[in-house]
Amino acid sequence: MIPGAFEYHRPTSLDEAIGIMADKGDTARVLAGGHSLIPMMKLRLAMPEHIVDLQAIDQLNGISEDGGSVVMGATTTQAEIIASDLIARACPLIIEAATQIADPQVRACGTIGGNLANGDPANDMPAVMLALNAEYRVRGPEGERRIAARDFYEGTFITALGEGEILVAIHLPPSPAGYAYTKQKRKVGDYATAAAAVVLAMQGGKCSKAAIALTNVGDTPLLASAAAAALVGTAVDAAAIDAAAEAAMSIARPVADGRGPSDFRTHIAGVMTRRAIETARGRAA
Amino acid sequence: MAKMHVKMTVNGKPVEALAEPRTLLIHFLREDLGLTGPHIGCDTSHCGACTVDLNGRSIKSCTVFVAQANGAELTTIEGIAGADGAPHPLQKAFREHHGLQCGFCTPGMITRAMRLLEENPNPTDAEIRNGISGNLCRCTGYQNIVKAISAAAAEMAGAREAAE
Amino acid sequence: MSGQVASAGERAEKLQGLGSARKRVEDARFTQGKGNYVDDIKMPGMLFGDFVRSPHAHARIKGINKDAALALPGVHAVLTAADLKPLNLHYMPTLAGDVQAVLAEEKVLFQGQEVAFIVADNRYVAADAVDLVEVDYEALPVVIDPLKAMADDAPVLREDLAGKTEGAHGPRRHHNHIFTWEVGDAEATGEAIGRADVVAREFISYQRVHPCPLETCGCVASMDKVNGQLTVWGTFQAPHAVRTVASLISNIPEHKIRIVSPDIGGGFGNKVGVYPGYICAIVASIVTGVPIKWVEDRIENLSATAFARDYHMTGEIAATSDGTITALKAHVIADHGAFDSCADPTRFPAGFFSICTGSYDIPVAHVTVDGVYTNKAPGGVAYRCSFRVTEASYFIERMIDVLARKLDMDPAELRLKNLIAKNRFPYTSALGWEYDSGDYDTAMKKALGAVGYDALRAEQKANREAFAKGETRSLMGIGVAFFTEIVGAGPIKNCDILGLGMFDSCEIRIHPTGSAIARLGTISQGQGHATTFAQILATEIGIPAENITIEEGDTDTAPYGLGTYGSRSTPVAGAATAMAGRKIRAKAQMIAAYLLEVHEGDLEWDIDRFQVKGAPERCKTMAEIAFASYNQAIPGLEPGLEAVSYYDPPNMTYPFGAYICVVDIDIDTGVTSIRRFYALDDCGTRINPMIIEGQVHGGLTEALAIAMGQELAYDEGGNLGQSSFLDYFLPTAVETPVWETDHTVTPSPHHPIGAKGVGESPNVGGVSAFSNAVNDAFAHLGLIHTQMPHDHWRVWKTAERLGLTA
C-alpha cells in the first residue's frame, strides 16, 4: 500500500524533462496521470528513485488540428478526450473507447499518453490507435521522431520507446465513418476479457477499407489484418463477418486468468469482433 | 528521504506543510491535516472511499502523491457544506433517503456526487449509476444512494430556478 | 397539567416509535465526514504496527533476520514468535476451541500468514521495514483441495496438534481432520431413501468468499503503565467477548481492560474474531509503553482474515412420485483453512447448518459435517451467514430445484406442495429446531402473484422455442427461493461462545427532564441501532425517540452482551430493550399512582402517559413521572428511574422469505442480465421499514456478488487468486440491479415485540434465487446443477457443454 521513496521533479518544459530523464537513466520514470504507475508503486512492483511529473509542461496537454490530422497531447486526460467536440467529430472511436476505460475518477486523471506508452497489453487505447493507424511523436535526447502505432508495441511492457524518450503527441489521420469499440469486462473498472476496435468505410454497398485490432488477448495489442481483409470488398454480410471473426480468433493468444480460460477469452475476442463490425457497419451507412 | 515543502488550498483555506514526496494525498489529508472524512478502503484504486475534489475534478486521493497536489485547490467532505454551515443538498438528501448505513463510503460518495451534479445537473438514474461507478458501497446496494443523488439534483435545480 | 391535549395520533407520531420510518441519527456525523473510525484515532506518541507475511502457503521457517529492519531509523521493534513465546502469546485460543498462531513459529500454513510485527514511527517507515526483514523459508507440499485433505498420503499440516486424537468437538481421525458433527436419524433417513419412489442426488459446492466490509480490520492498543489499564479501540463486533478473552490470555484482570468499538465501517462477520494484529498491538503497547495502531490493508484483509463458506455438500433428497418429500441427507466437507477460528456458538462447530431442511416439512433427515484443515486462511463463519445458514439454505434450495428437475415439476409448485403449513407452527424440524411462527403459503403466493409467475413461465416457454429455432441467442431463467432463517442466538442452555452465554442486555436511565440514555451489549456496524432501539423504547416508555440516546460499544459503560452478528441484535438485545422499558413503565405506573392518589390498578397506559380509567383527563406523562422520580419521596420506592434487563431468549427466531429472480443470459458471451429481482421478507414486527429496506438492498447486493462472481480461489501452490479488488468481485452501481422489496408480517410469538431480525435474510435467500435462476435457464436442455459463481466464463462453459455455442 505504501510506495518506496523517490525524489520528485516537476519540469516546466519538455526539454527540461528530457534532460532529467537522460541524467537519471533507468532510475527515473515519467508521471502523467499516475493511474498505471502509482498503483504499481503502491504494490512495490515499481520503485523508481526519481519521478518526473509532466503536469506543468503545457505543450503536452490539449487537442488541436494540424492540417488534416487531429493531434492529442500526451497528457490529455481521458475525461478531456470524452468532452472534446473535435474528437467527437473527427474520431469518435476514441471517445467510445475512453468511456469504457476504468471509472470516472480514474478517467479524470488517466492520460492518453499513459494508456499508450506503458506497453500494457490490458490497456484499451493501443488497439484503438492500431485500428486508426495513428502515429506517435516522441522526443528524446537525440531529438524528435515519429513511430507508427502499428510499429510501437513489441512485448508486454516493451515498446519502441528508446532510452530517455517521452511520448509527446498522437497524430490521428482522418477516420473512416464506421467505427466501434466493443469490450467485454466483468464489471466497470475491469480490464477487457477481450475487446475489438473496428473502423471501416463503405462505398457503393461494399467495404472499401477496414481495420481491426484486439485488446488484451496477446502480449501486445493485436492488429487483425487478415480479419480486416476478410471484410474489404464485401457487403459486410454474415459470411464476411464470420470470416473476419475466425481470422481474429486465430491470432488471439490470451492468458488464462480470472476472466476465464484462454479458449473462452479467444472466443470472446471473436464475439467482440463480430459485434464491433456490426455496429461499425451500421454507423458507416 | 528528504521532505518537500507543499502548499495548497484545502476547503478554502491555505495549507503549508513538509511531507515526503511519496506521501499519498489521502494520508496527507488524514494524518497531516487531520481531515479524516475521506477513507481508505482498498489498495488498488478501485473503491473510491478516498475521493476528493482536486482542481474541479473528482479524483482518488490514494492514487496521487502529495507532491502532485502541490499548488492545487482541494475540496473534501469537510468542505462541502455551505459557508454558513448549512448542509449541502446532497448531505440532506442522503439522510432523507437512507443513502448510507455504516458511513464509510459516504464522504467519498457525496464528494463524487457533488462533482457529478456540477458536470451533469439533471442526470438519469443510469447516468447516476455510471457516474458513481468509481465508488463502491457494501451496505446499501446503491439504490437509495441513487435516489438521494436524484433528489438532491432536483432540489438544486429548483433552487437555481428560484434564484433566476 | 395545562393546555390542549394533542390527539392520540399526534402523540404517537411524535414518539417515532415502532413502525416509524424514522430518519437516522447517525447520518449527521457520517454525511459530514465526522465519523470516528479506528483509523481516525490519533494519540500522543502513537506508533504504527505492520506485518511481515508469508508468501508461501506451506513452508518451514529456517530463520528470520531482523537486523536491517531494526537498523532503519524510526523502527522501534520487530516482534517474532520468539518474543511472544515467553508470554505464551505466540498462539492464541480461537472461538472454535482450536489455537491459532499469532506469529508463525516453526512453519507457515497459509499465504499471508503473520510472521513478524514491525513497530515504527509511522506506516511509511513500517512498510519500508517490512521489506528489510529476511525470512528463510523451506517450501513444503501444499494441501488445497478439502476433498483430498484426508487422503492417506496428505501432508501433515498442524504439527502442533501431533498426537492429539481428541479435538474440541470430539475425536479426530486423521492429522488434517478437525471434527465430525452429526445430527438427525441416520437409520430412518437411510431407510426412507432406500424405499423412496424418487431419489435425487447432487454435489453442491458453496465457494470460499470474503465478507469484505469497506473498512478493513484494525485497532489502537494503549497500555497505561501508571494505572495498569489497557484500552483497546478496535473493529470489534463483540467488544465484551474480546475483553474477556483478552483478560484470559494476557492475565490482565478484566476490570483493568477497556474495549471500545468506535464507528465500524461494516462488519458482516469479518470483525467478530480476534486477529494476530490485535494481540501484537497489545503486546507492543505493553513493551513500548505507548499506544500502537495496527490497521491492515485490503490485500491483508482478503488474504488473512475471516473468510466465509467453503462448504462442499453432497445431498440426497427422497420423494414420492407426486412430489412429497420424504427424506433428506447431507454430508459436508467443511474447509476451515489452517486453523479453525470459526465464530460459531461453542456447541455448534458447523453452526446452524441443521436448518437445512429449510421451509419444508421433511419427516426424517440426517446430516454429517467433517471439518478439515488446508493451507488456506483460517475461519469459515462470516458474511451475513447466521452461522452457516447461508450454506444450509443454498443446499436445500438447490436440492429442491434438483428434485424438481427429476420429477419434471415446476420448482414453485414443488415448493408449495412441501412448505410447512401454517397450522403446524410452532414446528419442530426433523433436525431438532422449533420454528416459532410462519405463514409460508401466503408469502409464497403473494410473491408468485406479484411477479406474474405463470406469465413469466409462458414467456420462458416462448423464449426457449425461439432459441431452438435460432431466432434469439438469449435464454431466460426464473429462480425461486423460499428460505427460512434461524437467527437471534441464543438461549444460554445451548448457545454460548467460549462459555459466555449468548444473552444480551439493555440498561436505561431516565433523566429528570424526561429524556433518557440507554446502553446495550450490541454494536452497530451500519445497522442503525442508535435510531431503531430508541424506537423500541419510545413505544414502550412513551418518550420520543429523539429524546433517547442509545450507546453501545464501550465495555466500561455498556452492560455485558455478546455483540452484533448473526442478526441477533433485534431478537436478543431488542427483547432486552423492550423488557427494560417495561420495568421502567412498571415503576412509572407506581409513581403515577402515587401522584394521582389512586391505586395502580386504576391506571391505564395511553401512548405516553398513565391516565385514570374512565377519567383520562387525570393523567401523568412520562416526562412528569420522570421529574417526580427525582423530586418526590415515595414510600416503598427508591428515587430515580432506571432499569436493566439481561435477556436469555427462550428460542431462536425464524425470519423467512420468498425471492424470485428473472435473468436473461447471452449465450455467446456468458453474460447474465438481472432483469428483475423481487424479495418478500417476513421478519415479524417491523421496527423501521426504511432501515429494513436498506438491509435487504445491501444483502441482496452481497448475494449478487457471491452468486455471480465472488470467489477466493487458490492454485495448486496455495497462491490466492483474488487478494485485491483487481479480481475480487465487488459490484458497482452499474452491475447492481434495482431491487423490489415487499413483506408479510408474522410476529414471533416468544419475542416481547414480535420482531425476528432481518439483516442476513437477503444474503441467505438471495444467493439461492440467483443461482436457481441461472440453473433454470438451461434446465430444459438437461442441466441439473452447475456450481457458483456464475461468472461469464463458467456460464459460457455450461452452454458449451450443452452444445449451444457452436
Image (cartoon, helix red, strand yellow):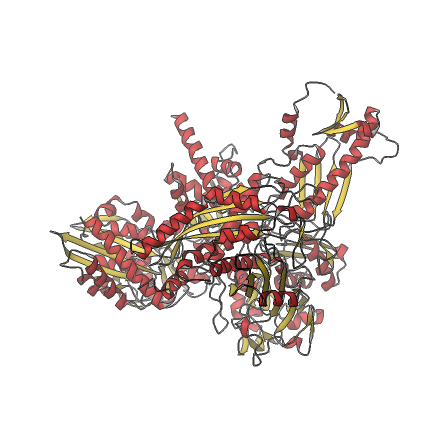
Q: Residue most toward the left?
A: A204
> In the displayed structure, would residue C514 be above or below residue A222?
above
Residue at position x 28%, y 50% in the image: A95
Q: Position of residue C550 (x, y in %)?
A: 67, 41
Q: Position of residue C676 (x, y in %)?
A: 44, 47
Q: Position of residue C248 (x, y in %)?
A: 74, 62
**Front residue (pair C204, C13):** C204
**Front residue (pair C529, C571):** C571
Is residue A77 in sight in this rendering? no
**Front residue (pair A47, C584):** C584
Q: How many marks?
A: 0
Q: Quadrant of the N terminus of chain C?
A: top right
Q: Quadrant of the C terminus of chain C?
A: bottom left
Q: Position of residue A154 (x, y in %)?
A: 28, 68
Query: Does residue C416 appear to the left or right of A73 in the view shown?
Result: right
> In the displayed structure, would residue A238 be above or below residue C56?
above
> In the displayed structure, would residue C188 be above or below residue C534?
below
Query: Does residue C706 appear to the left or right of C232 in the view shown?
Result: left
Q: Residue most toward the top?
A: C3
**Front residue (pair B1, C304):** C304
Query: Does residue A185 appear to the left or right of B83 in the view shown?
Result: left
Is residue C412 in sight in this rendering? yes
Q: Residue most toward the right?
A: C635
Query: Does residue C106 appear to the left or right of C507 in the view shown?
Result: left
Choose top left, top right, bottom left or bottom right for residue C607: top right
